[in-house]
Image (cartoon, rainbow, N blue to C red):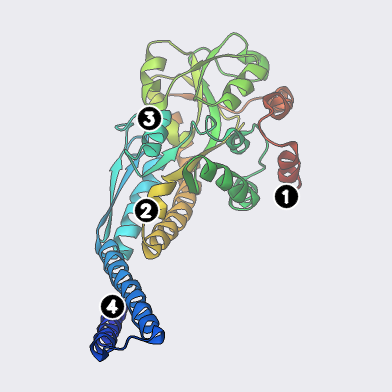
Amino acid sequence: MKKWGKLLAVVSAVTMVAGMMAGCSGSGGSQTASGTTTAAATTSAETEAEAVAEAETEGEADSAPVVIRFGHSGTEEHQYQVFAGKFKELVEEESNGHITVEIYPNAILGNDREMIEGMLMGQQDMFVGSSTTSWVPETAVTDMPFLYRDYDHAYSCFDGFLFDELGSRFEDNGLALLGYVSIGWRNISNNVKPIQSVDDLKGMKIRVPDMEVYSATFNAMGATTVTVSLNELYMALQQGVADGQDNPASTFWAQSFQEVQKYVTLTHHMLGTNFILANNEWLNGLSGADQEMIRNAVEEAEQYQRDYLSGVEDELVENIRQAGVEVNEPEDIESFREACEGVPESLGTVPAEWIEQIKGM
C-alpha cells in the first residue's frame, strides 16, 4: 500500500506540473524569465514521469514470483538435503509462497564443479557443496587436517573472520557466500584392513574430492590418491577403482557406503565443510526484502542442520557398525597428526596468519 500511495502522489505532482506548463504557454509571455520557467517545468515533468515509470517497474519486480533452482550432489538423506529441505520450508513460509525453491539432489544438475560453472552461467541460482578451490583457493582453510579442535571452535572461525575473508573472494568471482554446511568429522574407510597408524595407509589407493587439500593430506600420510566425484564414488568403490575413501559418518551412511566398504577408522582428521553459494548477480537483482528473507532462511536452516548433525553423528557410527562394517579408533592418532603438520605450508594457498589466528582462537 505504501508503494501505491507514493505512486499516486507522483502522478498528482505530474498533473500539477502539466497544469503549470499549460498556464505559462497560454499567457503568451515572451520574456526570458517566462521561457526559463517553461523549460524548467518541462524538465521537471520529464523527471516526474521517469519516477512514475521507475515506481511501476519496482512494483512489478516486487510482485514477480521468485523461483530458486537449488542443486547439490548428495542423496535425499545427505546433510546437504537436511539443509536444503529446511531452507525451502522456511523461505517459502516466510514469503507466503512468493519465493519457491526447486531442489535438485543427486547431482542432477552435474557434479560440484559443473554446478558452480552452471550457477555462474545462470543455469541455477543456489548450490551447496565443495570443489570451490578452483575459484577461491583459500577455501582450503576449512578442510585443513587437524586444525579445528571441535565444532564450536570451527564454527566461531567460519562465522567470524573467515566469512568476511572468503566472502569477498567469492564475490570477486561472481558468487555470494551465504553460509556453510558442515557434514561432520571425516573418517577413513577401506576394503584392505583396519588402520591403526599412518603407516597402514602406505600403498592404499584412497579416493579424494576435487580439492588439492585432500590430495596433499593423503599424500602426506603415504597413500595414493584418485579423484572421484561423490555421485560416482559408490561405483568406484564397488569396482575397486579405489581401496577406500574418507567421509563423515553422515555421508558414509547417506550414500550407502556400508555396502561397499569393510573397515572404518575414526580418525576425525578433518571437519567436512561445504559452502552455500548463490549467483551474485541473480541475488543482487532481487528486491531488498527478498534478499533479506533468503539470507535469514539460510542462517536459520544452517543452525538447524548443525543441531541435527550433532544429534545423530554417534547414532550413525553405530548404524554403520550394525550394518557389518568393522569400526575402530586408531591406536596411534598422533602419527596422523605428525604426518599432516606440513600440509598448510606445502599447499601455500592459505595465508599463514589465518592458520595462526585459528590456532589462537
Q: Using residue 101 as the reference point, say whether residue 133 is left or right of it.
A: right
| Residue 322 in view | no
Distance between mark 4 and mark 3 Cα atoms: 55 Å
**Image point (32%, 69%), residue name:** 50
Relative image position of residue 37 (x, y in whole percent)? 37, 84
- Viewer-side residue, 45 vs 54: 45
Residue bearing mark 3:
255
Quarter of the image for residue 39 reads bottom left
Residue type, mark 4 in image: Leu
- Kindly identify which numbered label has been placed on residue 252: none
Q: Quadrant of the N terminus?
A: bottom left
Residue bearing mark 2:
87
Residue type, mark 2 in image: Phe
Relative image position of residue 122 (x, y in whole percent)? 34, 40
* Residues at discs 4 and 1 in contact (Cβ within 8 Å): no
Label 1, secondary structure: give it: loop
Residue bearing mark 1:
361
Distance between mark 2 and mark 1 Cα atoms: 30 Å
- Kindly identify which numbered label has been placed on residue 7: 4
Label 2, secondary structure: give it: helix
| Residue 357 in view | yes
Distance between mark 4 and mark 1 Cα atoms: 53 Å
* Residues at discs 2 and 1 in contact (Cβ within 8 Å): no
Circle nearer the viewer, 4 or 1: 4
Distance between mark 3 and mark 1 Cα atoms: 34 Å
Label 4, secondary structure: give it: helix
Q: Disc 4 or 1, which lies upstream in sequence?
A: 4
Label 3, secondary structure: give it: loop
Residue sticking out furthest to the front = 30
